[in-house]
Amino acid sequence: MRKSGLAALCAVLMLFLCACGSAHTPALVVDGVPVSQGVYTWFLRDALRDGSQNEAGAAALAEANCRRLVALDNYCRQHKIAVRTDLKSAAAEHTRGEWALFRTQYLARGITKPDLTRIHTFEAQKKQLVQTIYGPGGKHEVSENVLRESFVRLYVGFRAFEGARTTRGADGETIPLDEAAQKDLLAQFQAMADRANSGVDLDALYAEYCETQGLIVTSPLAVSLMKNGDPMYDDGFFDAVQKLALGRTGVIQTAGSVYLLQRVAIDKSDEDAFAARRDEVLWHEKLPAVERYVAKLGEKTVLQE
């Protein structure tokens, strides 16, 4: 978080909490439904997090999101739209994980675990609305062919293995390799990439590398599928893989590793891979449309003074 954003967040939160008094007093009442101070504060914090909003803009966005939350909850109830069990479970797991990590910070800001549950349920409801409108049997069902074409655009496939750019210090701490060792590692991986592009099998190169590290290979390198923005990978990793031609091998560096990586084709007829990611593809395609629809629902709500 940028310092300016953090300072603004602290200032707005202090003003907000002082003005509201009791933590049990709702921050807003939308269409007769109370929205807690914790939920409002979470949206306010989210709006200020990247420093792109001033205080007035962040407050307006937080209020708008509170309106949307109530509007969507009412809409789902009126249209008997039940959130799918797996989406409920994912929301609950998200809440548990966040609460375990940030409980102290949230409580200091007046955000409770039920507040988090309400926020993550809101996100699950939006995904469910995508499924209801655009999924199988929906009024505007997205065709299987469109989803499969989107699938091969959204993901890249690759096989890879890595070498660490770090080592263990005398006290067991992780420390970077010195400059000479890093150059040697990079040169080693580049030489392997050249051999792979000359026809040497990547699994053979992996076996050779493991032998130099005193490791035993127990299985061939698996194909990984990665979606742009996947938090498991460093920023820029997806773009670096995508720049490789299909079948080509290259070297990609991250903060802590060097990867020997070979891009492989993704076939939109790959049933297992597509089936496992079908929902993600649909959400990518249609969640923005649902977000806009929910925003319009929020605009129609009545805010009680």
Image: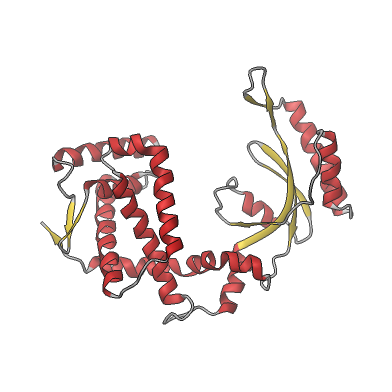
Q: How is the image coloured?
A: secondary structure
Q: Residue at x 82, y 51 (%)?
A: 202
Picture layout, residue 20 above or below residue 197: above
> Quadrant location of the N terminus?
top left
Q: Say whether residue 1 is visible.
A: no
Place of residue 73 in the rendered image (x, y in percent of width and height, measured from the top left): 28, 65
Place of residue 56 in the rendered image (x, y in percent of width and height, measured from the top left): 24, 48
Camera-nearest residue between 160 and 115: 115
User: Viewed as shown, does residue 185 lie left or right of 54?
Assistant: right
* Total labels drawn: 0
Picture layout, residue 123 above or below residue 203: below
Which residue, as the protein is rendered here, is positioned at the far left? 305
User: Viewed as shown, does residue 265 lie left or right of 212?
Assistant: left
Q: Quadrant of residue 125?
A: bottom left
Q: Residue at x 48, y 66 (%)?
A: 283
Q: Say whether residue 195 is visible.
A: yes
Place of residue 42 in the rendered image (x, y in percent of width and height, measured from the top left): 31, 47
Q: Residue at x 66, y 60 (%)?
A: 156
Which residue, as the protein is rendered here, is positioned at the far top? 170
Place of residue 88 in the rendered image (x, y in percent of width and height, measured from the top left): 40, 59
